[in-house]
Image (spheres, rainbow, N blue to C red):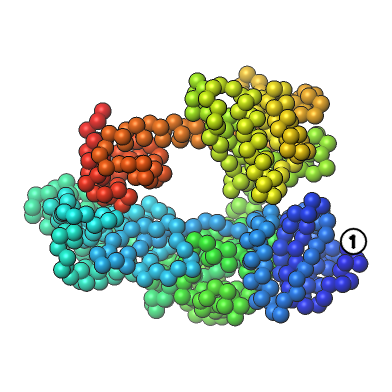
Amino acid sequence: MFKEELSNVPKKSGCYLMFNKDGVVIYVGKAKILFNRLKSYFTGRVTGKTKKLVSEIDHFEYIVTNSETEAFILEINLIKKYDPKYNILLRDDKSYPYIEFTNEEFPRVRVRREINARKKYNHLFGPYPNVYAARRLVNLINRLYPLRKCETIPKKVCLYYHIHQCLGYCENKNIDIEPMKKEILSILNGNDKLLIDKINEKIEFNSKNLNYEVCKELVEELGYINTVFKNQIIVELDDNINRDIINYYYDNSYISIVIFFIRNGKLVGINNKIIPVINDIKETLEYYIHSFYSKNNLVPKEIIIPDILDVEMMSEILSTKAIIVQRGPKKHLFDMAYNNAKELYEKEIRLIYNNEELTYNANEELRKLLNLDKLSIIEAFDNSNLFGTFNVSAMVSFVDGVPSKKNYRKFKLSQEKNDDVGSMKEVIYRRYFRVLKDKLTPPDLIIVDGGINQINACNEILDSLNLPIKVIGVKKDNHHSPEAIVDGDTLEIIRIDKSSNVFRLLSRIDEEVHRFVITYHREIRSKGSISSVLDNINGLGEVRKKKLIKKYGSVSKIKEADVSELSEIIPLNVAEELHEYLNTKE
């Protein structure tokens, strides 16, 4: 297989692209020696996801580079460009919350969930294990210190000034905040004793002033903080350098990767993931580590990596100090990361194998049932309306039997009446006109919720766009469970065995598209309700209403927010009026 093509591949470093028979890039890799790597795919023994990849390869291309580092950079850029489905398996898109002490004349403390990994931040602390922990600490600091609370400085002092939670920066410009800033930065850098002392100081002050309700709240905060500190693992490193420790465990074509977050001498969090190995362990680790730090997670001053990786290359790619450890406290933590990776693998791998078997087998059974040459991408549609109002549609995408949520789409329809056929025509046209216009990869199968009328409407639009995509409808029983497939070509009714993998796959797709469209429908209705409520507040124009709707999504969520939180996106006086209105309105 590919014997002649392989004979022309040079023994040099570079990148390679794997294409399927439709000319779509399905995998991008790099190699120190291109000939050896490409030969291993077609002449060696391959298993798992690699075997599936090889079965789909129609041809390959390669690009020679001057070094392995150059090849790595090129690989990253090619993956960004083509977004190949087998590279997606190796990613971890999880992001963690951070706390920022803003670089402003009168700074604030706030949670940052979305960060730019390439941007330099003066005072950014984390990652925190979850957003709840980060927000609770931010709220506590804001209670303990009279920091600025509003996003934009108003003209006059507000309630926070009168209750001693703000120094009135709007009217008092010559305020020395350096002592306060120094304490807050010390707390965020891990000075537990200072934080506890500060809480106890506030408890004593409020007790003397008979503010027992405030005392009770601060005692609860103290208990929470003590619990958090008690559960933190104190590591044997006292140099206060922020570092991540990365290790892995590999078996049976899967790699379990663990990242320890060490901050100020404490193990504050752990990231873990099990992913398939497509080419080899080294390259899978390299790509995973780069993808983890390239999006929403900051690179610390030092990372400890396994010895199979190239220290110089990782240091250059991540712009930080990468090291390999052989002994001492760092080696002890490195080994602990390995033990965690192994334990995670042993705990999760059976479930992964079972899910993989079910998804792959179900997809393959459905392909054979419908006599399709291939079945990788499925797109399913559902409509929702309320007496002909708030008409919406939604599409979910499944790739090889697994939801691909980044490809989900929502459609607000122009139809003002209850017309399922008209709605189907509109959404199919809008979706696949965009597929043609943007040169997107079309699906192998379209599933519509409904019978012959919806199928005919869908086929009519596809024919007008000259898109030969297989369409099926799914018939439901009295319990809204799939019982038969309606073939879009022949209109033949194909009964489904409810114990089969096909039934499980179709049920999962049906539940997912129904959940997605109903959630969107409620969101649209809720936004209409929010908008009418917000019309009663002076100072809330269209721009500010949109910001509130985008952040909170419902009246109840806005009602739960306090004035300081609301004032982050609208002026303080407007936030106070809105808060008072919602909390006095039945």
Residue 295 percent across, percent down from the top left: 52, 62
Say which of 560 and 220 sits in front.
Answer: 560
Q: Is residue 175 above or below residue 508?
A: below
Q: Residue furthest right?
A: 4
Q: Amino acid at mark 1?
A: Met
Identified at 41% across, 35% down, the residue is 527
Q: Quadrant of the C terminus?
A: top left
Q: Residue furthest top?
A: 478
Q: Is residue 513 above or below residue 226?
A: above
Residue 184 percent across, percent down from the top left: 27, 66
Question: Mark 1 packing: few (<14 Cα in 10 Å), some, or many (20+)?
Answer: few
Residue 548 shows in this picture: no
Residue 348 percent across, percent down from the top left: 61, 52
Mark 1 = which residue? 1
Say which of 153 and 137 sits in front.
Answer: 153
Judge from the rendering whether residue 145 lies leftward or rightward of residue 484; answer left or right: left
Residue 44 shows in this picture: yes
